[in-house]
Amino acid sequence: MTEFIPPGTRFIPLPDAFAMKRGGTLDGARVAYETWGELSPERDNAVLILTGLSPDAHAASNEGNGDAGWWEPMVGPGKPIDTNRWFVICVNSLGSCKGSTGPASINASTGELYRLGFPELSIEDCADSAAHAVRALGIGTLACVIGNSMGGMVSLAFLLRYPGIARAHVNISGAACALPFSIAIRSLQREAIRLDPKWNGGNYDDASYPESGMRMARKLGVITYRSALEWDGRFGRVRLESDRVGGDPFGLEFEVESYLEAHARRFVRRFDPNCYLYLSRSMDWFDLGEAGLGARGGLSRIRIERALAIGVHTDILFPLQQQQEIAEGLGDGGANAQFIPLESPQGHDAFLVDIARFGPAVGAFLAAL
Amino acid sequence: MTEFIPPGTRFIPLPDAFAMKRGGTLDGARVAYETWGELSPERDNAVLILTGLSPDAHAASNEGNGDAGWWEPMVGPGKPIDTNRWFVICVNSLGSCKGSTGPASINASTGELYRLGFPELSIEDCADSAAHAVRALGIGTLACVIGNSMGGMVSLAFLLRYPGIARAHVNISGAACALPFSIAIRSLQREAIRLDPKWNGGNYDDASYPESGMRMARKLGVITYRSALEWDGRFGRVRLESDRVGGDPFGLEFEVESYLEAHARRFVRRFDPNCYLYLSRSMDWFDLGEAGLGARGGLSRIRIERALAIGVHTDILFPLQQQQEIAEGLGDGGANAQFIPLESPQGHDAFLVDIARFGPAVGAFLAAL
């Protein structure tokens, strides 16, 4: 029931009557962002990072906030996204609870929290608000836009809707549309939240909070963000030292269960449930090829000079063929487009942890720009 | 809160003080079964089918029950499991609510439902009760035991614990132990049931029933029983005709969501929640190689003449390498063992629907016995 805004976050106001794709407008809304490095006098070295569902704009430590960020090993001086050369901007997604306006924000026109009164959120709205932020920072053309997971979807909408806004693109574990397996998983996550009586149609507070629903949603997320292969090696059939915690006959018994529980505990009270519902649903709706083009056709309408799509074999949520499709579709549109499938065992979340593989792939692409 | 026993089901009483692996005993318990075909005078043509978590003993139509069974295209005269030649027995698993004794049965010593007073159920208990049923039917050695999914686990325990009880074995989408991804999925299914306030520590009734928990558990099951590949072709991004059923802003919108909902509705009130918890947990506990042997080592201790392990590439719950391990491990033990990976797109449940691939594989193996 709260926003979770890291210290040092900066904000760009969105123009009033900011129009949402599926209808409705926002007044007094804003986009949260952070930056690293220096914008060149020619304003030609800006790199935009668009995030997955849950991260804030604090991708890495900086002057405003010395805490490690969610992509700390990737962003900084001498790192793959080298801030000695690039002026790096990370924006928090519209609809989030990490600083950009969303269902957990105050509706300026009522003085109350938006909750389900927030207009329906689309991936395209996230793209529009990010484009506004880029313009507001005085940047005409980005050197590159990098999008991870949901941010990969936002990137594609951004590039299609704003021709010429970037010269290059790195799409990491993204997709040009949602497929039914991931729709099914996300639908079930949302159902878990909505079935929790404490969700109460979106009208919860800290004292009466849909903790069980959020726990289920997060555990299902973590299961689908990683891979069976990784877990075979990492957990096997190892049991907790205390066989059956708490004496509950159906309580935690295996290490893998305890791992899920720990992940869920860290998340449940650190992400707003209504924001989760809105962002999750926006991914299901996303189809770059709507209006009959097909995903590949939508991709071919994007005009960009160079592109890289990266994915991993073990990703069950954004399967590898979706990144291959992105590279091929951007190639159809005339981009010099490259597809790099990586052998990471860590599944969809590999880009957050398998820096040994992702770092060189992203670093080499940027270095060659 | 009820048992669901098909008409024509027959029963074999278990001996009193039937000992359970993890402690406790059953008095007045029974195993439900059905048969097809005729036992030969030499009593050498019996084939036992052990099922997955949810099916009853009604694998196919027979004299006692003309309704189609859950494996109708596989079992019958001239079918892959040819009842002109074989005397086929299918037993319902101990712990189920489909006729064999389980948590939804009356405890003879109290006159009340067992509920969570049922002793902890292990895969080995299911094997022991099935072995008792085979003996009670006057069969010394089975021609073959066929186990699907959980029944594949039960089969392996059965063969290890009763040397010489079968000459041949077909293991379909089974496993010699549970791995962490499937443990995580099942743990989450059980948590969904347990989190439903109406589960009430196992003390529910038809009027106050953990419907939401069962719905979540079933949907997660169906998602993991099938495959993303199948769903891409089957559902794609097709929307329901009535955009957003019921005006709920987070209601069903895509066909894949409606498919899951329909599956859940059919299941929720047709399977007892406590039985579900017991059977699900028994799979997590199963490890043929416990006591330090490892799964492959456990398999190598099984003595059988011929074996066939079948699996599919798209199975994420009992992945293909587990069926390969079964074939290799049974081979280590001296069996003439064959491994057939099938290209079914239907995932773990393929054996129920992809008869075009499974029928010939099983039929050829049995025909050569």
Image: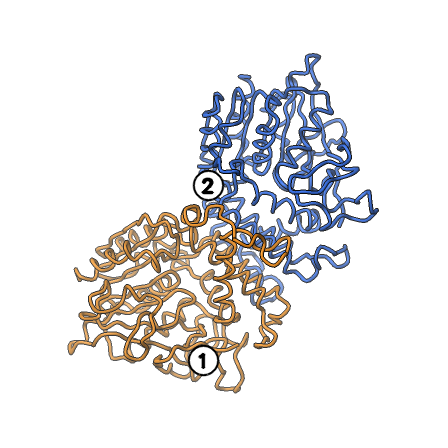
Chain colours: A orange, B blue
Q: Quadrant of residue A170?
A: bottom left
Secondary structure at numbered mark 2: loop
> What amino acid type should be assigned to the residue bearing mark 1?
Leu
Is A206 located above or below residue B356 in the figure?
Answer: below
Is A93 located above or below residue B169 in the figure?
Answer: below
> What residue is at 56 percent from the left and 45 percent from the top?
B284
- Label 2: chain? B
The x, y position of residue A315, in whole percent, is 40, 51
The x, y position of residue A32, in whole percent, is 37, 77
The x, y position of residue B94, in whole percent, is 69, 38
> What residue is at 31 percent from the left and 80 percent from the top?
A64
**Residue reaching furthest top?**
B42
In the image, taking residue A224 as reference, residue B78 lies left or right, namely: right
Viewer-nearest residue: A96 or A227 = A227
> What amino acid type should be assigned to the residue bearing mark 2?
Thr
- Of the numbered discs in the image, which one, if any, rests on residue A26? 1
Is A199 located above or below residue B96 in the figure?
Answer: below
Q: Quadrant of residue A131?
A: bottom left
Foreground mark, 2 or 1, reads 2
- Label 1: chain? A
Q: Quadrant of the C terminus of chain A?
A: bottom left
Number of other residues with Cα within 10 Å of mark 2, as a class: few under 14, some 14 to 19, many 20 or more: many
Q: CA distance from mark 2 to mark 1?
A: 44 Å
The x, y position of residue B349, in whole percent, is 55, 40
- Of the numbered discs in the image, which one, if any, rests on residue B28? none
Residues marked 2 and 1, same chain:
no
- Tell whether label 1 touches label 2 (CB within 8 Å): no
Is A45 located above or below residue B98 in the figure?
Answer: below
Residue that numbered label 2 is attached to: B314
Secondary structure at numbered mark 1: strand
